[in-house]
Image (cartoon, rainbow, N blue to C red):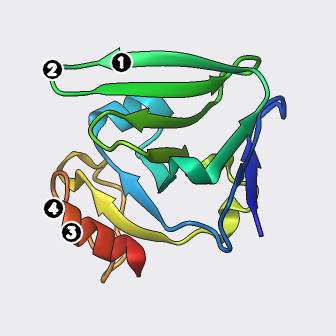
């Protein structure tokens, strides 16, 4: 089975070699707020080898002191589809809104909640961290 998604204009499409929709999390950091133009961004972590993309993809690299993030956008509509990061080799960070069945997703965790918009209510019982979560706890939360 595959999970499919794509950009807003349809020029870029992708398939994930998964049997079910991936778990997703919300990031409330200011970088994600600015990149998404919204209160937070919602992402799924998948193995890069599970992702196949077709269409006109353009790449934009953002390098900071401790990592390089390689952003992939549709070359036509410029919708951001996914990125990789040198701190997490082999992991693709899919923008959850690009999944064809995004309305079926369940947000399993929230990170950088110290920066969340105060009108955003996080449901009780959903794991959350004021900054980045310790990796073991974060993976456990996403695993369900």
Which residue sits at x=77%, y=17%? Answer: 76
Chain-order first, disc 4 or disc 2: 2
Q: Is mark 4 on a helix, strand or loop?
A: loop
Return the x and y of residue 93 as percentages of the image width and height.
47, 45
85 sits left or right of 16 in the view:
left
Asked if the residue at tag 1 contacts the one at tag 4, i.e. Cβ–Cβ closer than 8 Å, the answer is no
* Image quarter of residue 126: bottom left
Say if 128 sits above or below 15 in the image: below
Chain-order first, disc 4 or disc 1: 1
41 sits left or right of 72 in the view:
left
Question: Disc 2 marks which residue?
Answer: 65
Question: Disc 4 marks which residue?
Answer: 134
Asked if the residue at tag 2 contacts the one at tag 1, i.e. Cβ–Cβ closer than 8 Å, the answer is no
Question: Disc 3 marks which residue?
Answer: 136
Q: Observer-nearest residue: 138 or 31?
A: 138
Question: Disc 1 marks which residue?
Answer: 62
Asked if the residue at tag 4 contacts the one at tag 3, i.e. Cβ–Cβ closer than 8 Å, the answer is yes
Q: What element carries label 3?
A: helix
What is the distance, in whole Å, between disc 4 and disc 1 at their CAs?
23 Å
What is the distance, in whole Å, between disc 2 and disc 3 at their CAs?
24 Å
Q: Residues within 10 Å of mark 4 (few under 14, many from 20)?
A: few
């Amino acid at each position: 089975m595959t999970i499919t998604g794509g950009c807003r204009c349809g020029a870029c499409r992708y398939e994930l070699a998964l049997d079910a929709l991936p778990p997703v999390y919300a990031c409330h950091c200011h970088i994600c707020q600015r990149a998404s133009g919204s209160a937070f961004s919602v992402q799924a972590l998948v193995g890069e080898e599970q992702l196949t993309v077709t269409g006109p993809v353009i790449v934009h690299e953002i390098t900071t002191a401790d990592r390089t993030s390689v952003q992939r956008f549709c070359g036509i509509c410029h919708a951001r589809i996914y990125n990789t990061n040198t701190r997490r080799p082999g992991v693709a960070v899919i923008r959850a809104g690009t999944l064809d069945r995004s309305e079926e997703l369940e947000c399993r965790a929230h990170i950088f909640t110290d920066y969340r918009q105060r009108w955003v209510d996080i449901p009780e019982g959903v794991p959350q961290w004021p900054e980045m979560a310790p990796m073991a706890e974060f993976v456990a939360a996403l695993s369900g």
